[in-house]
Image: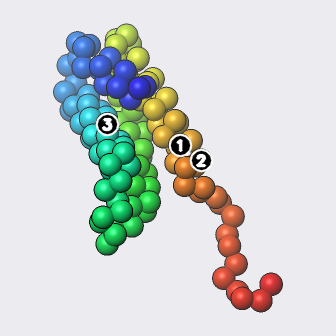
C-alpha cells in the first residue's frame, strides 16, 4: 500500500526532472506488478504444476532486485524533490516501502547472516 501511495503521490505532483521521477514510477509499477504476479501464483497454486522452476528462489530474487531498485529510485526522488510536497511524500513512501520489503523478505525467507557449517563432523 505504501508503494502505491508513493506512486500516486509522484504521479499527481508537478515535476520537471522527468528522468528522476519516470525511473521511480517505472520501478514502483514493476514492483506492484511483480507482487501481484506472485500473489496470483500463490492463490491459484500454479507453482505446483510448474515444478521446473524453484519458485521460492525466483520470488526471493525478484523481491531483492525490486527492493534494491526501489531504494535507488527513492534516493534519486528524494535528491531531486526540490521541496515539492507531493514529491517528498512519494520519496518518503518509497523509503517506507523499501523498509517494509526488507522486513518482509527477512521474515518470509528466514534470511540470516549466520554462516552454516558444511562439515559432517561437529
Quote the CA–CA distance across marks 1 and 2. Answer: 5 Å
Quote the CA–CA distance across marks 3 and 2. Answer: 20 Å
- The reply to whether discs 3 and 1 touch (Cβ–Cβ < 8 Å) is no
Residue 17 in the figure: left or right of residue 5: left
Kind of element beneath mark 3: helix
Residue at the spot x=44%, y=60% of the render? Answer: 56
Q: Is residue 28 above or below residue 2?
A: below
Can the viewer see residue 79? no
- Residue 52, image x and y in percent? 31, 72
Mark linked to residue 32? 3
Residue at the spot x=31%, y=36% of the render? Answer: 32
- Residue 55, image x and y in percent? 39, 61
Residue tagged by mark 2? Answer: 107
Sequence-first tag of 3 and 1: 3
Q: Is residue 37 above or below residue 121?
A: above
Kind of element beneath mark 2: helix
- Toward the viewer: 17 or 7? 7
- Toward the viewer: 16 or 11? 11
Q: Quadrant of the C terminus?
A: bottom right
Quote the CA–CA distance across marks 3 and 1. Answer: 15 Å
- Residue 57, image x and y in percent? 43, 62
- The reply to whether discs 1 and 2 touch (Cβ–Cβ < 8 Å) is yes
Residue 34 in the figure: left or right of residue 108: left
Amino acid at each position: 500500500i505504501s508503494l502505491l501511495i508513493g506512486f500516486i503521490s509522484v504521479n499527481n505532483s508537478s515535476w520537471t526532472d522527468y528522468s528522476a521521477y519516470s525511473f521511480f514510477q517505472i520501478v514502483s509499477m514493476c514492483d506492484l506488478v511483480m507482487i501481484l504476479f506472485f500473489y496470483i501464483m500463490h492463490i491459484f497454486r500454479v507453482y505446483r504444476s510448474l515444478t521446473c522452476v524453484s519458485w521460492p528462489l525466483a520470488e526471493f530474487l525478484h523481491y531483492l532486485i525490486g527492493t534494491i531498485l526501489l531504494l535507488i529510485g527513492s534516493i534519486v526522488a528524494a535528491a531531486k524533490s526540490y521541496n515539492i510536497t507531493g514529491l517528498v511524500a512519494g520519496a518518503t513512501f518509497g523509503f517506507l516501502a523499501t523498509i517494509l520489503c526488507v522486513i518482509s523478505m527477512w521474515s518470509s525467507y528466514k534470511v540470516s547472516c549466520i554462516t552454516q557449517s558444511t562439515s559432517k563432523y561437529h
